[in-house]
Structure formats: C-alpha cells, structure tokens
Amino acid sequence: MAADTDGSGVHVVALCGSLRDSSCTQRAVERALDGARAAGGTGAVIDLREHDLPPLDPDVDSQGDSDAVVRRVRGADAVLLGTPMYHGSYSGVLKNALDHCGFDEFEGKTVGLLAVAGGGFPVPALDHLRSVCRALDAWVLPHQVAVPNAASQFEAGEVVDDRLDERVRVLGRRVVAYAHIEPDTPSFEADENVGAVD
C-alpha cells in the first residue's frame, strides 16, 4: 500500500526509554513527533518518568500505572520507540514498558525506531528493538534513526546538524504516512508464491 497523502486523524504515541533529566532521547523523540504533526497527525510522548511501572509480574493483573500506559499504546494508530543505547542494546526502562504490552497493542501497528548513543552509532539497539517488534507482529518502518555522539548533537534543545534533524523529522512523517498500511494486500506475487508442490 502506498503512503497516505493525508495524515489527519493519525495519532502517534512515543515511548521514551530514558529517565534522565535533559534526556537527548526525549528531545529526539519530541523532534520526530514534530515531523508527525507536520504530516497532519497528532503526537504525544509517554514519559515513563511520570508512571509507576514496576517490573512485570505476569501473575499480577494490573501493576502501578500499567493499565494507563498500555491503554495509551493500544489507542494509538502508530508508535515511536526511542531509546538510549545501554551496553549494546536498548534500555531496561523501555524493555519493561514493552513487557507490559503485547499483541493487542502492537500487532499490525506501524512502529518507528530511534536510538541515541553517547558514542558511536547505536545500531545494535535498533536491531534488537526491530526483533522485538517483529515478534509482536508489528510493521516496523525501514527508515530508522541513529543519533551518535548525542551530547554534541543538541544545542538549546535543538538538533544542530540539519541532515540529522531532517532524518529525525522524516521518521515522524513516515510513521504517519504508513500508519494504516494493509497487512494482507493482494499481489501477483502472493498468488504465484504457493510453496512447494509435490
């Protein structure tokens, strides 16, 4: 399915996997949401610092603010996941939030990925998040954003590199454009690829 030309009515939520004050991840995610709004959508960050979200206990039906967080993710048309890279992967804070969610929140939903690192490119964190989203049957955008050397990328809350800033905003625009992708679009290839025949 081609991208929608009108993003009106598309609501995007972003989960920020950083609890730091003046978080570069938070700033990058907010900038991506600027791109979503420019495409005609609406957007909001689920700031995990503001929620009581204990480590998931599968034997407990509802923990802390988990119902509120899960409800907001489920109600979104698309999701942005933003994380700092910790020890070569995404943050435990984001992992715990995702653990509270499941197929009801992510199956068939479009997801955009963004990762931030204090040093080099945080590609492993993006790869790991992509695997998690695939396990939840989400539609992950090919376009993703890696923000290396994060401390030098922001000034007064703004991205200083114009090319990086555009890449971040493109993520927001594309998550809106592809929010209603059809999972089972008929195609010539689907009819022809019938598998092995005896």
Image: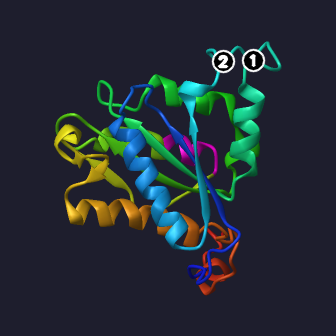
Q: Position of residue 128 (x, y in %)?
A: 42, 39
Evaluate whether residue 127 shows in this view: no
Evaluate whether residue 41 shows in this view: yes
Image point (22%, 65%), residue name = 162
* Structural distance between the alpha carbons of marks 2 and 1: 8 Å
Callout 2–callout 1 Cβ contact below 8 Å: yes
Magenta span has 136? yes
Q: Determine the image quadrant of residue 149.
A: top left
**Quadrant in which the C terminus appears:** bottom right
- Identify which residue, 9 or 130, lies in the foreground: 9
Q: Which residue is mark 1?
A: 63
| In the rendered image, the vertical position of residue 191 relative to residue 178, given as above or below | below
Q: Determine the image quadrant of residue 68.
A: top right
**Residue ranking furthest to the bottom:** 188
Q: Main secondary structure of the magenta part?
A: helix
| In the rendered image, the vertical position of residue 77 relative to residue 86, given as above or below | below
Q: How many marks?
A: 2
Q: Which residues are magenta?
A: 131-137
| In the rendered image, the vertical position of residue 72 relative to residue 195, given as above or below | above
Q: Amino acid at mark 1?
A: Gln
Q: Residues within 10 Å of mark 2 (few under 14, many from 20)?
A: some
Magenta span has 114? no
Name the element at disc 1: loop
**Quadrant in which the N terminus appears:** bottom right
Q: Position of residue 153 (x, y in %)?
A: 21, 47
Q: Which residue is mark 2?
A: 56
- Identify which residue, 162 or 195, lies in the foreground: 162
Quick check: 90 left or right of 1? Answer: left
